[in-house]
Amino acid sequence: MSLTAQPIELISFKLCPFVQRSVITLNKKGIDYKITYIDLTDKPDWFLKISPLGKVPLLKYGDDVLFESAVINEFLDEITAEQIMPAAPLQKAKDRGWIEYLSQVTMNQHMLMVADNQEDFETHKASLTEKLQRLENTVSSDSFFNGPQFSLVDSAFAPILTRLDLVKRFFNYDLLTDMPRLQALSALLINQSYVKKSVVEEFDEIMLEYLKDKNSYLAAHSF
């Protein structure tokens, strides 16, 4: 793995999809890094002192600190060779827009997964399905989101697809039905080694326990 000018440490929570975005980018680009997990229900004082928003991911680059996954990912891309963010201003702007859009999809997905009643579940399902359909109509039919080359949009999309796959496997609930392009992208991305290694080995078990603790409607019903 390649070394950067300063040691890199990623502050993480084991289930956070935004952290997973940055781990994917670190893995994809072959960057040496250390990962430190914290409990978001009991945030340590040292973390709160250096995290302006009190959220993960947080990237320590030597003595400097960066926050927000999109910012972190662009920084990691820029300080290493073979950049995966487009150089052309227009395409770069488009990618940034889709990354922000995927942040909204990520939150919508989370709300669906933790909804504790049918009404909220159906509300978030409708909103998520609408967003996924827009992505289905946008994503390239040629491998990754933009085409044959992996991009930071894929880093942002892979955590969503990881969780949709978990929902399908454990709850027999497939939100990508009738979305063949997203099904193909999901099959491609979640089987890449840099995505597989972006979550902890016990990810499924921790997520299922988390949903149980949240009294998740999804986890409590058969579909």
Image: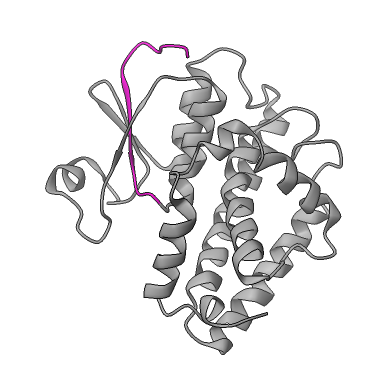
Find residue 211 and report its horizontal and vertical position in percent.
44, 70
Residue at figure coordinates x 73%, y 68% from the top left: 130
Find residue 15 and report its horizontal and vertical position in percent.
42, 53
Provide the residue span drawn in magenta: 1-14
User: Which scheme is used to colour this image of the protein?
Assistant: one colour
Q: Quadrant of the C terminus?
A: bottom right
Magenta part, dominant SS? loop
- Residue 147 quadrant: top right
- Residue 106 quadrant: bottom right
In the displayed structure, 142 sits above or below 99; it is: above
Q: Is residue 60 left or right of residue 191?
A: left
Q: Is residue 70 left or right of residue 174?
A: left
Let me know if residue 7 is in the magenta part: yes
In the displayed structure, 156 sits above or below 118; it is: above
Q: Nearer the viewer, residue 197 or 205?
A: 205
Residue 137 visible, this orientation:
yes
